[in-house]
Image (tube, helix red, strand yellow):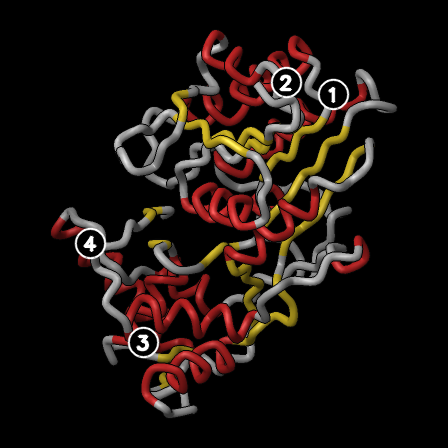
Amino acid sequence: MNNKEVAIVGGAGFVGSRLTARFRKGNIFSNKYDIDLSNHLDKSIYLDVEDVDSLDQLAGVSTIINLAAVHRDDVRPLSRYDDVNVQGAKNVCEASSKHGINKIIFTSSVAIYGFAPANTDESGESNYFNDYGRTKYLAEQVYKAWQLEDPESRTLVIVRPTVIFGEGNRGNVYNLLRQIASRRFLMFGDGTNRKSMAYVENVVAFIEYSLSLEPGLHIYNYIDKPDFDINTLISGARKTLFGKTNVGLRLPGFVGIALGYAADLAAMIIRKPLPVSSIRVKKFMGTTQFASSVSDAGFVAPVCLEEGLARTLRYEFMEDNSDKRTFETE
């Protein structure tokens, strides 16, 4: 195997597929490794981070990019978070040590910070509130211990993205944009709260940039700046979709929360989750904003946030891409 190969573990997912395409364009030799081989066009090589023997396939690679994770809210049993995110990290580190691989790029998450103060940077304290954030934090500790075993030779890059959106993704940002595109969106609150976001093409561009980093520990929040407030996000989406720059119908925040509680009650009665809930309304009206030092590292995102949003809207709601693959991330 070519000793300059970059191994993308979890490469069949949303970020991994975009990263592979970017590497291909940039003539970076890489292979995708994944447990999911259901898409025969994907050309992934089978690898399971829980299966130590399968990790021997990484012998000879120069860099491991580990994107593999359990992240959805509905994962059962809950032990799956630890099995994949934490034990998987231990297995990757053991394979790296065994085969002399000295560079790991690990995608963590801002979920390790939990409900953090606005503009929390990479030095922020971990205050996770769910199993995803907890196990991402624990995985970081595993990778840090691996790097400290040989700090002069080993490179560890930990990337903590905020919510990632883009073409083909089926996560929270897509759900919001779909409501706007369907003209069923109701605006709650004054819309001045800000949301940190990350366009997928910029995330993979930063991962590519990370390949050049020297031995040591490098930790970065990934956020596309400047952060949009909700008014800017909604009006920008409506401008692309309808040529209108207002936010549409706006209701006071307390009305939105009341409707959310009513939806909670209805969901209990019918024993079925609804797309609206009090928690979702509160999250929508809250600020989720992080700081990042990626620009200090010399990285310049190839796509501005406004253009990333416009590209996503055109792809999802103005063009026919029904034959393209989609990725469920929530």
Regarding mark 2 in the picture, which secondary structure is present there?
A: helix
Regarding mark 4 in the picture, which secondary structure is present there?
A: helix
Mark earlier in primary sequence (4, 2):
2
Disc 1 to disc 4, how far (Cα)?
Answer: 45 Å
Classify the position of the N terminus by image quarter: top right
**Residue named by callout 1:** 145
Mark earlier in primary sequence (2, 3):
2
Q: Which of 315 and 41 is in front in this view?
A: 41
**Residue named by callout 3:** 180
Q: Tag 4: Cα neighbours inside 10 Å, few (<14), some, or many (≥20)?
A: some
- Identify the disc placed on residue 267: 4
- Identify the disc placed on residue 93: 2
Q: Residue at x 48, y 23 (%)?
A: 82
- x, y percent for residue 252: 40, 82
Disc 3 to disc 4, how far (Cα)?
Answer: 23 Å
- Identify the disc placed on residue 35: none
Quadrant housing residue 65: top right
Mark earlier in primary sequence (1, 4):
1
Q: Are the two marked residues, 4 and 2, in contact with CB atoms closer than 8 angstroms?
A: no
Disc 3 to disc 1, how far (Cα)?
Answer: 45 Å
Disc 2 to disc 1, how far (Cα)?
Answer: 9 Å
